[in-house]
Amino acid sequence: MKRFAAIGFVGVIAALTIPVAAQKATAPSLEIRALSTRPELVSGGDVLLEIAPSTSLGTRGPTLTAKNLTVLVNGKNVSASFKSAADSKALVGLVTGLNVGSNSVQASMRGSKATAQLTVVNHPLTGPVLYSPHQTPFICETQAVGLGAPLDADCSANTKVEYFYRSSTAPSGAGQDQGDLAAADNANGFGGGRGGAAVNPFKPFDPNGPHPIDIAMTTTTEGKTVPYIVRREMGTINRAIYSIAFLHEPGTPLPSPWTTGATWNGRLVYTFGGGVAWGYHQGRTIGGLNGARGNLEDGQYGDYPVAKGFALAGSSLNVFGTYANDVVSAETMMMVKEHFIEQFGPVRWTIGSGRSGGSMQQHMIANNYPGLLDAIVPTASFADTLTFQTSMLDCELLDRAMTSSKQPFTTDQKTAVSGYSHWDYCTNNKLRYAGVAADINCDATTIPQSMRFDPVKKPDGVRCTYQDANVNAFGRDPKTGFARRPFDNAGVQYGLAAFNEGKINVNQFLDINRLAGGYDVNGNIVADRMGADLDALRLAYETGRVNDGAHGLSMIPIIDMRPYTEGPGGNVHDTFDGVMAGNRINAAGGGNRISRVYEANVPIFKAQDDNLDVLDHWLAAVARDTAPGTQREKVLRNKPAGLTDSCFTVKLEEIKDPAKCNAMFPVYANPRIVAGAPMTGDVFKCELKPIDKADYKRPVTDAQLTALRTVFPQGVCDYTKKGVMQRPVQGTWLAYPASPAATTK
C-alpha cells in the first residue's frame, strides 16, 4: 500500500452486501465486486476486485477467462493483474496505484458485449476514511513496540515481518495461565496483560537457519498437523500500530487471493482491547493481544486461535484504553482487514474477541458497521460507552451527595441507592474512567499536565472527555466551542426504589436529590442538575452512539461471556451492564444471543476456546445453508442444538436451569434503574411529569411533597414514556460528519 495526502470525506455509506452492478442495460453483462472492502471506502492505493459473469449473461457467448478479459483503471490497462480464483468462475485481481479520490474501473470481455463499470474511492493509508478530521494532537509510539522512530506526523512506520515458533518444552496454551478472569485487567482495564503468566513459550525463528529441535507441532481446524511456526506482521495503518499473525512455515507458499491449501484456515479472529480513555496518542498495546507473548496470543483465547489455524489481528486504535471512539475503532479494523484480504485473500468469517471496553467495541461495530464482524464474544460486556459513562457520573454525584449530607448513611443504604451489589463499585470507579472532567482521564505517559486543558492556564489544552473524543459525531457548541455533551440527570429521583422499599427514609431521599447536582462544561460538580445538549442527544441515538441492538447485532451469532465479579472490591464489570445489552438485542428480536455466566476464577482460555468453537461451528452451518432466507433467519435456524443461556461452575460444569443460575449469580442494577428507568438503560434524558404522591410507596406528608417539588421544580422523570430525543438509528455505515452534527438546528 502507498501513502497519500489526506482528503476530506463525508457522507452516509450505501448498503454493504449488494454487489456493485455492472451496468443498467438489460444486455448481457459482467459484475465487478470489491472483495477487500466497500468500493467507496478503499484505502492505501489498492483494492482486490472480483469480475464475474452476471446472472443475465448465463451460458450465452464466450466463457470469461483471463485471456478475453480487459480491465481499464483510469484508462490504464491492468488486465494482467486478473487471474482465476480457486473454486470459482470469477477472475480476481489486485489493482494498485489508485489515485486518492474517485477511480474508474471498466471491464469488458472480447467476443461479447458484456461490460461492467465500478467507481472506487481511495483514501490514504493514514486515513481518515470514516471519521474526519483526525484527532489532534497525536503522540506517536512506534518505538514502544519495536517499530523504530515514526516516519511522519501520522506516526507511520515501516512494515516488519518476523517469525516465531512455539517450543515443545512449554506447556500447551490450553493448560497454563488459567488465572482469575477478574484479575486479568491491569490498572487501565486493558485485556492483554496476564499477571503472573508463565515464561513466554514463543521463541524467535530464523527463516534462513536450521529448524530448532524443540519446535512444537499443532493441528488446525482443517486437520492439518504442521510445525508451530508463526508469521507476525506489524506496521501502521490509519495512524494505528497493527499486528497480524498466523501459522506459516517459511519456504512454503503464503496464502493468497488465488490459492487455497495453506495452513491458514480462512478465518480471522479480530481482537479488541479494554479500558476507557480519550486518546491523543497512538497506543502501546494492540487490541486485546498479549504483548508479553509477542502479540501472538489473545488475552481471552490465549494461543488457541493461532494454533488452530485462525489468523489473529488487532491494532492500537482498537483499544478503548487508548482511545474510546468506536467509529475510529471500526475504521481502523476495516482498513486492517482490507490490507489482510489484499495480501492473503478473502476471509470466510471474522469472529470478535474482547473484554470490557473490548466488548463495547464489538457491540457497536457489529451493530453500526455490519459485515466487519460475523460473530462476537463480548466478555464482561457493556452495551456502549455512553451507557457505561452515565453510571460512572451518577456514582460520583451520589458519593458527593451522601458524603456531604447531614443525614447519616450506612454502607448498606448507599449500596441500595446505587443499585450495585456493593457501594465499593461507586467509590472505586467514580473517577477511574472520568467522562466529563476535562483534565483527568488523559494518558499519563504521553499527555502531561502541561498539555491538558485548564480554563486559566491552558484554555486551548487537550480536553480528555467522552464528548471531545467523539466531537466529529456530536459537533461543537457554537457558544463555547467545546464538543456538545449528551449527559443529563434532570428529574432523576435517585434512590426512589430504595425509599419505596424502606431502605432509606424520606429525609435521606430528599437530601440525596437536593445535593446530587450535576457537572459543568469542564466536569466540575455544581449544584444544578445537568442538561443534555439536545443536538448531542439526538445524534447519540441517530448515529448509534447508543447501541440499540437492532441492526447488525440482530444478524450475527453472539456469546456474551460474563465472569461473575460482583461483591466487595468494586470490580467495574457488573453483571447488569451485560443484561442491559442483552435486553436491547432481545427487544430487537433476540434469539441470536447466548448468555454464559462463569465463576470468576474459571479456567479462562478453556472457557473462551469452547466459545470460539461454538461460534465457528455455528458460522460454518450458516455458510452451508443455501435455502432461501435472510441472514438473520439462517443464523437462527442454524443455532447449535441445545445451545441456550446457561452458567458454569469453576470446573466448567454447565447449568441450564435459570433458577439455579440466578441463585448462584444474582443480578443487581445501577442508579438509574433504582430511580425507575427501563431495564434497557437507554433513556438518557427523561420526559418530566409533576410530582405524584402515588409514586411513593412509603408515607409522605404534604410538607415533604412540597419539599420534593422544591427539589424538582420542573418535575420528575416519567419513565413510562420514551426518552427525550430517543429515536431509531438513522442508518448503518455512517461517516462523520454525516448530517447536521456540526451545526445548531
Image (cartoon, helix red, strand yellow):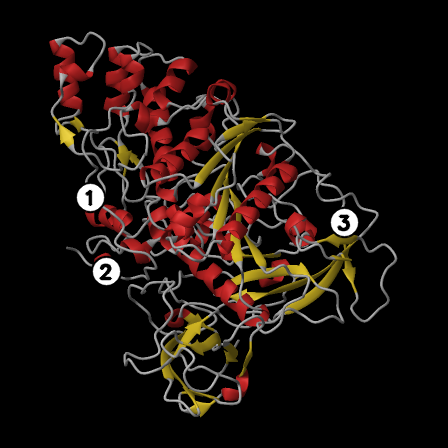
What distance separates the C-alpha of mark 3 from that of mark 2? Answer: 50 Å
Q: Where's residue 513, x and y in %?
A: 25, 23
- Report which quarter residue 598 is drawn in: top right
Determine whether 552 is above or below 53 in the image. Answer: above
2 or 1: tag closer to the N-terminus: 1
The secondary structure type at the circle numbered 1 is loop
The secondary structure type at the circle numbered 3 is loop
| Residue to which mark 2 is pinned | 739
> Considering depth in this image, is 282 or 244 the residue closer to the camera?
244
3 or 2: tag closer to the N-terminus: 3
Give the residue at x 49% y 17%. 663
Q: Which mark is residue 201?
A: 3
Does residue 48 appear to the left or right of 693 in the view shown?
A: right
Q: Which mark is residue 725?
A: 1
> Considering depth in this image, is 134 or 581 the residue closer to the camera?
581
Of the residues shown, which amino acid type is indicated by label 2?
Answer: Ser
Of the residues shown, which amino acid type is indicated by label 3?
Answer: Pro
Give the residue at x 43% y 80%. 59
Of the residues shown, which amino acid type is indicated by label 1?
Answer: Met
